[in-house]
Amino acid sequence: MKADEAQETEKKQNFTYILRCADGTLYCGWTNSLKDRLLAHNQGKGARYTRSRRPVELVYYETFATKQEAMQREWAIKQLTRQEKLALCRIFGQKKGTDMKKYDYVLVGSGLYAGVWAYEARKHGKTCLVVEKRDHIGGNVYCEDMEGIHVHRYGAHIFHTSDRTVWDYVTRLAEFNRYTNSPVANYKGEMYNMPFNMNTFSKMWGISTPAQARAIIEEQKKAVTGEPSNLEEQAISLVGTDIYQKLVKGYTEKQWGRDCKELPAFIIKRLPVRFTYDNNYFNDLYQGIPIGGYNVIIDKLFEGCDIETGVDYLENKEHYDSLGEKIVYTGTIDAYFRCQFGRLEYRSLRFETEILDEENHQGVAVVNYTDRETPYTRVIEHKHFEFGTQPRTVITREYPADWQEGMEAYYPVNDKKNQALYQKYAQLAARETHVIFGGRLAEYKYYDMDKVIASALARTAEEF
Ligand code: FAD
């Protein structure tokens, strides 16, 4: 180095720099020795702010001839928004070929789990990219507008919870109506109230008191003696023969695609029987449907995120991994690991939706078809979720289906074999330190909406 060049470098030993802290926040400072200053920050001697946020990483710097210039630049950078600072770092990283990622989080999937993540992340000033393989966001709670009715495209979704924190959370995002789920069962044209309660028993046996109903059920339960060896015996031992034959057998056989005698007893642990005239399906403290449909909630949760729909993350994994500091993955866990231990099993559904030129088709949102012969299990009339008065109506028939490649995976199959397989994938997942696996597909759990929200809130509380 020539004398004048060395002098020039010496003169330029003033730096304004930005650090990315362990919690993802940015810290800006100036120094006359980048190397020493970085070391000091990482030893907890650099600044009070960085002491509790170690390790820190250098993501940006500029050189200046004088201390004054570096300090002025520091002040100017501190006036920038986080987004503006991130943009500086990104351009700098691209020039230097260093690894400053474009987003704090890449969220794979756009259901409630990813939505709560997005919302909490944004509250903490983080940036998110959402990658969704369907052509819309919202996951299974997505509603489609047909005839001015919010149609639950992936099956009827009724929000119910006893978790006050979750209820407060969702009701801050949308106003809920007073919908109470009171489905009706249709057995070959005979209509019964659900869940099994005094209205059901009165219709079935022409009785009027709880004592009469109990006596009949107890008598019928005697048809099974000893430990139930299959689902049929289990159900009869819980509710007796009449309810089993008319309201449980056909429905369950359609759901599982097998005879109840061939299904294991553990699938039905209990069948709620109520000796009151109460048709409310859920026992939870809070229940309802968001006014305007679930998209009201979804739109708020993902506000401020960059969103790409119609894209399968797993087909472009390297690209999306390069964009985010961390990945929040809500797809099927076995697919993430290329099914290396074998496939997990799921149950699926097929939906057949129809617009009918009548105002009120079935008088209630949900009718279960409990005979074996009707091929579908339920008919949903969507307008009743929001007390709609539109001139026409939209119904959806639900057909249970075995899951195969290319179909939507709706329900995990909760048996020992699949749980053991899931555990193997969960062990691999624990080693992916930059990936958070969450939601019903990644955790292989049958989560209701409130449970998925609670799970995401617990995980984000650890993160932020
Ligand atoms: P999802 O909503 O499934 O979101 C996951 C998203 O990830 C999907 O949009 C999927 O397309 C996307 N994805 C997956 N893989 C990839 C990939 N490789 N690349 C890009 N995107 C990907 N709960 C209730 O509380 N009440 C009810 O009445 C109720 N009814 C239900 C009815 C049915 C038919 C079903 C199936 C579920 C019901 N649930 C109900 C449960 C509820 O749907 C779930 O708790 C909740 O929607 C789960 O949210 P999630 O974010 O985990 O998953």
Image: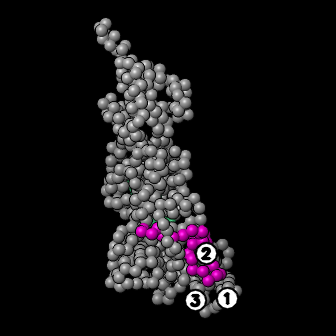
> Disc 1 residue type?
Thr
Q: Is residue 172 above or below residue 263?
A: above
* Cβ atoms under marks 3 and 2 closer than 8 Å: no
| Mark 3 crowdedness (10 Å alpha carbons): few <14, some 14-19, many ≥20 | some
Magenta region includes residue 90: no
Q: Is residue 409 visible?
A: no
Q: Quadrant of ligand 1?
A: bottom left
* Cβ atoms under marks 2 and 1 closer than 8 Å: no
Q: Nearer the viewer, mark 3 or mark 1?
A: 1
| Mark 2 crowdedness (10 Å alpha carbons): few <14, some 14-19, many ≥20 | few
Give the distance between the C-alpha atoms of the residues marked 3 and 2, in whole angstroms: 17 Å
| Mark 1 crowdedness (10 Å alpha carbons): few <14, some 14-19, many ≥20 | some
Q: Is residue 86 above or below residue 404?
A: above
Query: Which of the labelled discs sits on residue 272, or is there none?
Result: 2
Query: Which of the labelled discs sits on residue 209, or is there none?
Result: 1
Magenta region: which residues?
Answer: 267-293
Dot 3 or dot 1: first in sequence order is 3
Query: Which of the labelled discs sits on residue 398, or is there none?
Result: none
Mark 3 sits on what residue?
204
Magenta region includes residue 275: yes
Question: Which residue is painted at 36% across and 14% down in the image?
Answer: 11
Q: Is residue 433 above or below residue 311?
A: above
Question: Which residue is painted at 41% across and 20% down in the image?
Answer: 67
> Disc 3 residue type?
Met
The overriding secondary structure of the stretch rendered in magenta is loop
Q: From the viewer's side, name the closer residue of 383 and 232.
A: 383
Percent position of residue 194, x then y:
55, 80
